[in-house]
Image (tube, rainbow, N blue to C red):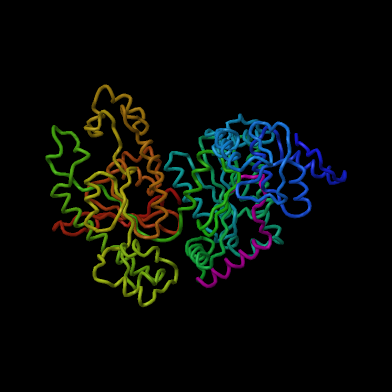
Amino acid sequence: MARYSPGLTADATWRTLVTLLGLVFVSSDSVTSLDRIHSLPSEGFLGRRFWQEFKVPLAPGRMDPLRLHGGGGDTPSGRLTRTDSLDDYSARKLTRSDSVSDGYYRGSATISHASNGYIQMIERSDLMAIDDSKIVLVMVGLPGRGKSFISRKIELYLTWFGENTKVFNVGKYRRQVVDPKDSGRADFYDRSNAEALGLRERAAGLAMNDLLDWLDADGRVAIFDATNSAKSRRRWVWNAVKSRNRRHHVVFIESICDDPKILQDTFNSKVDNSPDFKGMSKEDALAELKKRIANYEASYEEIAGSRVSYIKLYNLSSKVSCNKIYGRLANGLLPFLMAAHIGTRPIWLVRAGASSPDSSANGRLVSKAAELGNDGEVWAQALCKWVTQRSRNWMERHGSRCPALRKARLTINDVYESGDMCLPDQELDEETMAFFKQEDHREAPLMKIFSSTLPRAMNTVSPIGIPFSPYPQLNPMDKGSLSDYSLEQIRNMPEIRETFDKDPFRYRFPGGESFVDVVHRLESVLIEIEQQTAPSLVVGHTSSMKALYSYFAGMKFEDCHNQDFPQHTIVELVPVMGGSWIEQRWALDESKTGLTKVAGPTQLTQAQRA
């Protein structure tokens, strides 16, 4: 307790006030109290009375305002009187560096005793994070905000991970209930149109019933794709799901978009592809769509509050916010949603060039340290020439989106040395333009290179002359003690054949990996590929390339090991507004100096999305 000076006289009011301050800030068994009271003012009437009333040491470098001396009595351990020197205080404090004050900075070692409310909150999050629970993702947003695009991207992504995922588009059910010539018009979405409102609710009910039946069967993640713009509609969705099974989790995904350029792109895509506007001119279709949006805006209610789980996506990935998102699956969506976008750019998937024949022996696989052979060198030169020209063509076609790159003909080296110059409508001054036109800059296209760490993969892309960092995630599958054997040879081993054939995808090689492991380690690479806005060249090996290709093809990852991915072939993938990809394949021509198209163009997952 605080110790009073024997000769101090003060009125009762001030003594009471100062005593209360002492009770709060001074403790006889606490060294930290010295630090705490040093923050009190020494000037002013109250400050002087406090420093008079209690025998408290000054902080180093602080002058005693009243220069008091005296006191008396024994001082507790770790405490100083006003007559002790500051050096004594500092020295005594250093000898207790492992005490309370030091423990504060290192982290408290006290066992936590959380409140009941906090424990209940953690328990709720644990329940929502159970991996075997089923999830309903409910899209929210005005028309033309990319909800269907987001839904398809999520379906591709989760399907690739082996999660049974399906989109239930309410618009598709609505067109089955009412002819698109009628249901596609703006007055059909006027809330004063009671008949149309009933038909729309019927379509939503049909979609919800199919969704819940599918979940009851073998579904894992269902996506309810509709506007769901009113709070009452979202409450209906919640009640419908929970009344069927309270263990089903509901997560709302709201797409908010106010960027005029993005809106124009999504509007054009919608009127060009939606059956609602078939047979209409572009101008009339856009006008009809904007009237429909105005009807929805009259009753639109943005998601707010903290009771429900939701993800908000702004301008199709420029910003993401969330609330109560728990569990591996829901949490995994956040970085993917931040990466996915509607921009166009080519992605090239390529296996590393062939190694020399003497890198293998007795029919076993080549060494991981093997270099490129003659055929591999020829392929590397042709590949680099082709992607360089292809990237330049892409830059010329899409240069209007980045005038700075078009005018200065920037290369990747320029961007590395100057920082990110690819900003919308950016112009460069004459001095900067002159710098980028210097002859000592290598001519190389602006692209992102992803390569495994194996020498033959890095040598495949090195002739391009673009700096890159290798990605170990793209390395071939580790077969452990069987790394020297091909997959076909392993299948013929009697001691392995039966176990492998039961589940080839999940079979883990002794001391090595399974195809599941390969897919999971490729997740971060896939997200980075999706995030690129420039051409991307991905060079890996059979297992990693098959696993990546299965995502773009919309396959379950169980089927990826059955895909054909030949060596010395480029798989070119270009995104389309619907969320899927167009594929073309290129291989060496007869002269072995250039490439020729051998397949495509083919829209992947077209049959699946029909």
Q: Closest to the observer: 437 or 538?
A: 437
The residues colored magenta run 282-310
Classify the position of the N terminus by image quarter.
top right
Horizontal and vertical percent position of residue 248: 59, 37
Horizontal and vertical percent position of residue 276: 54, 62
Point out the residue furthest to the front here.
70
On the rendered structure, is 23 left or right of 152?
A: right
Is residue 294 rendered magenta in the image? yes
Looking at the image, residue 503 lies above or below residue 520: above
Image label count: 0
On the rendered structure, is 419 left or right of 185?
A: left
Horizontal and vertical percent position of residue 93: 58, 37
Residue at 67%, 54% (x, y): give it.
Answer: 230
Residue at 40%, 41% (x, y): give it.
Answer: 556
On the rendered structure, is 389 left or right of 312?
A: left
Please tell me in which quadrant of the rendered image residue 561 appears. Answer: top left
Is residue 409 rendered magenta in the image? no
Please tell me in which quadrant of the rendered image residue 25 appears. Answer: top right
Horizontal and vertical percent position of residue 341: 46, 57
Residue at 62%, 49% (x, y): give it.
Answer: 204
On the rendered structure, is 466 left or right of 379?
A: right
Q: Closest to the observer: 116 or 473?
A: 116
Residue 173 in sight here: no
Residue 453 in sight here: yes
Point out the residue furthest to the top here.
495
Q: Closest to the observer: 467 or 568?
A: 467
Point out the residue furthest to the right here.
12
